[in-house]
Amino acid sequence: MTNANPTPLTLAAVQDFLRAQSTRIAVDPMTNSVFALAQSLFQDVEAGKASVAELAKFAGDLHLTMIEERADRFREQHYDAAPKAGWSLVRAALDALARKGLDAFRTGIEQNTGGIVFTAHPTFALSRALRQAFTAHVTRPNKSSRATLLKHIREDGRPWTKSINLVGEHDEVQDALLNAAGAQQAYAALVLDVARKAFPDDWRGLRPYLPTLASWVGYDLDGRTDIHWSQSLTFRLREKAAQLGRYADRLEAMSGASKIAVLARLTVRLRGAAGDAESDAARFAEDLTDPEKLVEAANALTSHSKRMVLDATEITTVLDDAIPTVDDSLAAELIAFRAEVESLQLGTARIHLRVNAAQVRTVINRDLGLETEDRELGRLALAQLSQKARQSKPVQVNFADLFLEQSTARRQFMMCAQILKHIDSGSVIRFLIAESENPATVMGALYLARQYGVAEKLDISPLFETPEALETGGRFIERLLEEPEFLRYIKERGYLSIQLGFSDAGRFIGQVAADMAIERIHNLIARALAAKTDDVALLIFNTHGESMGRGAWPGSFGQRFDHVLTPWTRNGARTRNLRLMHEVSFQGGDGFLHFASLPIAETTYAAWCHRALSDPPDTSKDPFYTRTDLVWDFYRALRAWHERLFVNPDYGRLLGDFSAGLVVKAGSRQKRRTGGPTGPRALRAISHNATLQQLGIPANTASGIGSSLQRENDRLVELINASPRMHGLILLALRARVVTSLPALRAYANVFDPSVWIAHARLAEPDKAAAYRSVYYGLRDDETAVSINRIANFLSIDLGRFDRLLARLDDAPSAEERHEGRLDLHALHAIRQALMMRAFTLVGRLPRISQRHDTDARDLLRMVLDMRIAETVALLVEIFPRASDEETPFKALTESGSETKSAASYGYDNIHRDIIGPLDEIDRALHGISLAITHPYGAFG
């Protein structure tokens, strides 16, 4: 079976093909334009009318189109990559603040408003070279930048993914932090410039607060066992060495600073301390499982040489003495520099340590014999832990204790103690507890913090992300606030720290419902805290990714920041006289793109500063907050829909079969959680969302809305059109709907449908029919196609309802516009499916395999059906070694042998040429397609 005319591999021709197929739906509702194109391309390859290389080249062209469109959106978000545009908005906000007088200006620029956190979430799928080319194209798009993009798109991306490791991720975050620090300096200079003009007699007394920079790259142990404590300390020592060196550079670059004796001495001291920290880092990078090396490293670090800098106040005190004595220009530079030191302390960023609640719970249960998992939220354990925390006296620890400790949680507290004693004694450390569902866990952490003497510098922060936590988080905090010891602790700290996880919350209950639940918990906690005390602020760390499915609004930074911490929440806090501090995350390689160069970092940081300096808009007339009966009926229905989907066995099969092979490695952390639950719950949020992206169905964002409040559609439409908040939530779902393709999903079902392969075998030439029948035999007992179609049907009903709802909204694009917008994505899915089918048939042609290899052709076919093509290629190379032209080992033989000296008779060159080589070529092309498909969603996962 072949096409009379091969499908031209041009964008215009393929789009016309897809449009023509779509018109047939009115006649044949079972028409699938994506699979029609896939079959056409597959038949062309089988007939020799097209090659895998040609399909890969066309996929690369589509990749270029998609990454350019992503760059356009990114550029728009970043003020056309022009920092001046961003800073002009910040200047206007500062000028407005200055017009209110010195006291208002001082309050506005000196109070802690929060900051930015860099995480190591696995979104490094694009190679570093491709991300650098992307940044260059964003900054200055031209023929050269486009050609560079295409060059890196056409490179084999698989070696990059194999090379991803924690050290590389740490290197990348340091580069991003360097640019972010440059943006901090620009903001500080701007604040001082405005202050000097507005308050010529008083500006020297100002001490600006710079929104902080923090990182947990190298310090996050949630779900990881591969980060040794010595590696974390090595990272911190290297960060200290780098930052002290930069501080010295900053002082040297200031005109006139070298002539001020105290500043000159400080510069020399910083240089020496940086060198010592680098030497300490080198010693801690050794194999510290060797006690002798540990003793050497520990003794060197704990000796505390005279030139060691242990606290940032050793720097700021010198600056405070110098500022009143120098000229205005140098004084402004020194005040800005002082703000930088206050913000960063003795590292390139503040530290966020993270553990899982289970790791803390283990200590509570095993070491203290207390039960936390009862129906009363561990009330007895909470009370006892509160008493223990109150009575606890700090114990001294050294590096031997750290070496011998087996408990992850205890080890992290010990590491905190050693960092504060020997590396950076003035820096505050965040201690994040993932999957917090019980207040006793937080009190247990406080007990351990008191035990190891770090409570004064440790911000213990529960992370609410599971459905249970989102429901009970308000009561969770209320219960903690009833404990005098916890209340005393947060008063000592000056604020209560909490973290909200948009990614995992959206995985469990859908992103729109998660956004609503998180806004609710923000306000419940704010209300509880304000009712209990009036002298404690609330620090909210909203951790989210770069995609719609992980909490990032796909628009301007202003919309994005207002999405994760709504104006209603900010206004409510003001009404309660509660000061809010807000942090957001930029996660992994995709997040670091916002700090990939100094100009891009400045636009990002400027947007954050502008938002921190601006008042929230009035929300008192938004019906979202007055029509609570309708709103929360909608929430409950939407959440229930997603919870049913999440436990649907077909959904679990969809995420666990071949689709896992479509998701490339994107980070050093494992895709799945080890131990604990199985199925979708075992899949991490990024991998979960990435899998949905690869299948063309971001269901956790686009779906469920159509099935919510079906009987209240008229009222729901009115609410959406009248409420800015509800309108924003629905727009998020709409953006996801635009890149949702049920035809692409159903086409994957067809690829795995045994009847399709029987049909191909019936019409094929005899030499090909056998291979097609082999694929059929491999699939005949497989449930993949059935499960995909069931899920597609389930989603189709819901999305059909959503489409009808969208048709009634004021500004939603039409169905035709949405279909046109998906044509390029459809083409990519079709190319992938054609290549998958080709891979199946190649393995279907394998000869019989010797039993000594402990595998057979059916096993290899199963591996390819599971999209484990790279593993299959490696195994085939072992089973069928390529012939070698070298006869060196046998030249010494004196006995005559075969007349034919061709080495081909001793190898399997034909199998390499006809099967193994093409399979590897397909694997490379599929890897590139997986990368390309991420761009319409704005990020990996």
Image: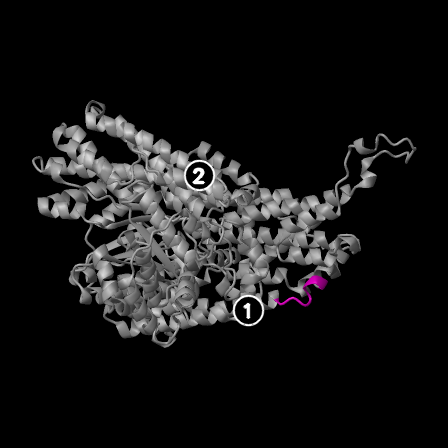
- In the rendered view, would you say 417 is above or below 441? above
Q: Earlier in the sequence, mark 1 or mark 2?
A: 2
Can residue 13 be seen in the rendering of this structure?
no
**Dot 1 amino acid type:** Asp
Q: Please give the range of residues in magenta.
A: 777-783
Q: Nearer the viewer, residue 459 or 406?
A: 406
Position of residue 675 measured from the top left corner of the image (x, y, whole percent): 52, 63
Query: What type is the residue that disc 2 sits on?
Result: Glu
Q: Visible in this render: residue 861?
A: yes
Q: Does residue 22 belong to the magenta stretch?
A: no
Name which quarter of the figure residue 521 lies in. Answer: bottom left
* Rendered location of residue 711, percent (x, y): 36, 77
Q: Which residue is mark 2?
A: 296
Quarter occupied by the N terminus = bottom right
Quadrant in which residue 780 is drawn? bottom right
Within-10-Å neighbours for mark 1: few <14, some 14–19, many 20+: some
Describe residue 47's horizontal placement relative to residue 53 as left or right: right
| Label 2: few (<14), some (14–19) or many (≥20) C-alpha neighbours in 10 Å | some
Q: Is residue 876 left or right of residue 108?
A: right
Q: Which residue is mark 1?
A: 650
How far is disc 1 from disc 2 in space, using C-alphas?
57 Å
Q: Residue sitting at 18 percent across and 46 percent down? A: 110
Q: Nearer the viewer, residue 220 or 615?
A: 220
Q: Nearer the viewer, residue 72 or 188?
A: 188
